[in-house]
Image (cartoon, rainbow, N blue to C red):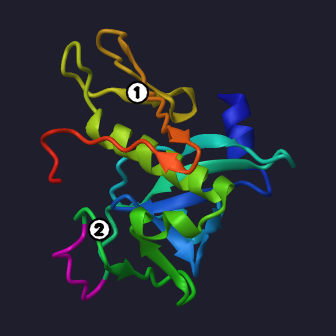
Amino acid sequence: ADALGSALHHPDAACVLLWQGKPLMRGETLAMVPMNHPVLAQKLGRAIEAPVLLGLEESGAPNFACDISGWEPAGQDASTVGSFFDPSFQHHPDFPPDYLFTELRRVMWQLSPRDAELAATAKAIVNWHGSHRFCAACGEPSNVSHAGWQRTCPACGTHHFPRTDPVVIMLITHGNSVLMGRSPAWPE
């Protein structure tokens, strides 16, 4: 707890800020928001109660994931928000005009490997907290613990962890040929 408190107050601590699962982008790059930014002090109905530690930069500066999904953009048509490929952008008034919340699928291809990893991990862990607020063993509300990588039930003591699903994609080649496969249920 002391180390996490120190990390939160580190002068170079920053976070990936999410709204409805959409990371805050500055143009074509991931916007890293300082942990002392005023928007983080606002009570905005977060999916998680506290920032989640994503890791440390080589310099030792900590990175976090923070959620402000309770904020409602003024005059926003929300009909596409949450769709598979949400084309909308949202601008929070506390940020410059080129800072926009953007669907990750739309921008993932242009992010650096570091930014893509931070954005994907932030979105996944915030989504996990949003869907696992209650203990699966007894149904009581659970609490965030271990820098956001565990939830603990105060009623029965059960510990809950986010799933980690490794993914491997293979390309099978033979000379200039590629083996292609498809499920029989997919269209030809």
Residue 13, picture quadrant: bottom right
Q: Please tell me whether mark 1 sits on a helix, a strand or a loop.
A: loop
Residue drawn 43% across the image and 63% down it: 104
Picture layout, residue 48 above or below residue 69: above
Residue linked to disc 2: 85
Q: Which residues are magenta?
A: 74-81
Q: 51 or 188: nearer the eye?
A: 188
Relative side of 141 to 187, left or right: right
Q: Nearer the viewer, residue 76 or 179?
A: 179
Structural distance between the alpha carbons of marks 2 and 1: 24 Å
Does the stretch in magenta take in 80? yes
Q: Looking at the image, which is closer to me, 108 or 32?
A: 108
Drawn side of residue 62 relative to residue 19, left or right: right
Q: Is residue 2 above or below residue 66?
A: above
Viewer-nearest of discs 2 and 1: 2
Majority secondary structure in the magenta region: loop
Compared across the picture, whether 166 is left or right of 114 comes to left
Does residue 89 lie above or below 176 as drawn?
Answer: below
Residue at the (44%, 41%) spot, across then down: 125
**Quadrant location of the N terminus in the rendered image:** top right
Residue tagged by mark 1?
163
* Nearer to the camera, 22 or 136: 22
Q: Secondary structure at mark 2?
A: loop
